[in-house]
Amino acid sequence: MLRKHMSVEQLSQKIQAEIAKVISGQNQVVEQVVAATFADGHVLLEGVPGLAKTLMIRSLGQVFGMKFGRVQFTPDMMPSDVTGTMVFDVSKNEFQFRPGPLFAGLLLADEINRTPPKTQSALLEAMEERRVTIDGVTHALPSPFLVFATQNPLEYEGTYPLPEAQQDRFLMKVLLRYPEPEQEINILKLHHSGFHPQDLAERGLQTVTSVDELKAAQQIVTNTTVEDKVFNYIYEIVKTTRDNRDILVGASPRAGIGLLNISKAIARMRGRDFVIPDDVKEFAPAVLRHRLQLRPESEIEGQTTDDVIQRILDSIAVPR
């Protein structure tokens, strides 16, 4: 359970303040990944190299006190390199299971689009079922189990686009952009003062919560009040993506569930025990952008998924 007199809002503020010791200029992204953690959802982070994607997730794992695992995906990686494999133990004269990096509370899947679909699919069962099957034997993953995957949107040589089924397993796709001028100057000053990203302890980064507290916070988020008008608003957004002339494949019910869960998390983080429609509207782009497939003619016209989502949101009256 959460510490006495500690709310999800207060816990969130402590976590974000701690991460701010090493991450500058990405406050909105940090809030989004913390919200996803409270919502028990996986996140796909997309941005050019050098925007601290890996550093952010490493910091998140340390602040939450979760067992951290990292996989640097490469074209020659096999599924067993992620899930683990059976190894023969000579002393016992039997095969024993050696867990892979997947068996961590928080897994950083770095440059996930650099490995072939066969290895990418090894994450599918883990992300959806929170378990893996090796040689017919099912192994449960830690609880909670979260995957934060990164990918570079600019490189196409030697990359393998994520299958639609796997993208749908991510609660959100978060876009990282360049920091504001003042924030980037602060980053330069931070490194000039001797900061080394490899040593988080050097910046005094501390564990401010525990896995048990995270589970308690997730349960509080689950119990957040949602009125019928909010359910209807979420449904209208999802349904409209299926009828839009610019979209070839619209959002599934899983997208609506994801939008509901992240809205409940952000409501608690902002001190409310109920969801308001503005929570839904704010997070709809992050929940939907990787689940929609535009028509080829719309892409030729230069439209983006975010453009279409924004038009959809503008066309639907926000309930009051």
Image (cartoon, helix red, strand yellow):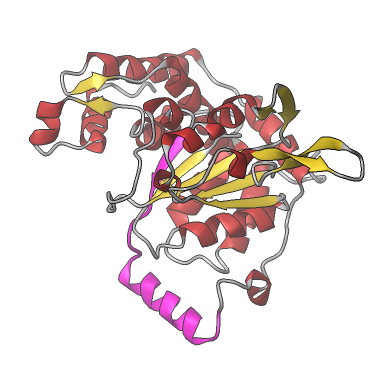
Q: Position of residue 126 (x, y in %)?
A: 61, 31
For image coordinates 69% across by 39% down, the residue present is 85
Relative height, residue 317 to residue 121 (above, below): above
Relative height, residue 292 to residue 185 (above, below): above
For image coordinates 63% across by 74% down, the residue present is 203
Residue segment shown in magenta: 171-195
Q: Position of residue 268 (x, y in %)?
A: 60, 37
Left or right: 126 in relation to 48: right
174 is within the stretch colored magenta: yes
Q: Position of residue 232 (x, y in %)?
A: 41, 14
Q: Residue furthest bottom?
A: 193
177 is within the stretch colored magenta: yes
Q: Is residue 113 visible?
A: yes
Relative height, residue 189 to residue 67 (above, below): below
Task: Quadrant for residue 142, please give it.
Answer: top right
Q: Quadrant of the C terminus?
A: top left
Task: Quadrant for residue 166, please give it.
Answer: top left
Front-lying residue, 253 or 314? 253
Q: Is residue 269 visible?
A: no
For image coordinates 66% across by 42% down, the residue present is 8
Q: Position of residue 253 (x, y in %)?
A: 44, 15
Left or right: 221 in relation to 300: right
Task: Quadrant for residue 207, please give it.
Answer: bottom right
Q: Quadrant of the N terminus?
A: top right
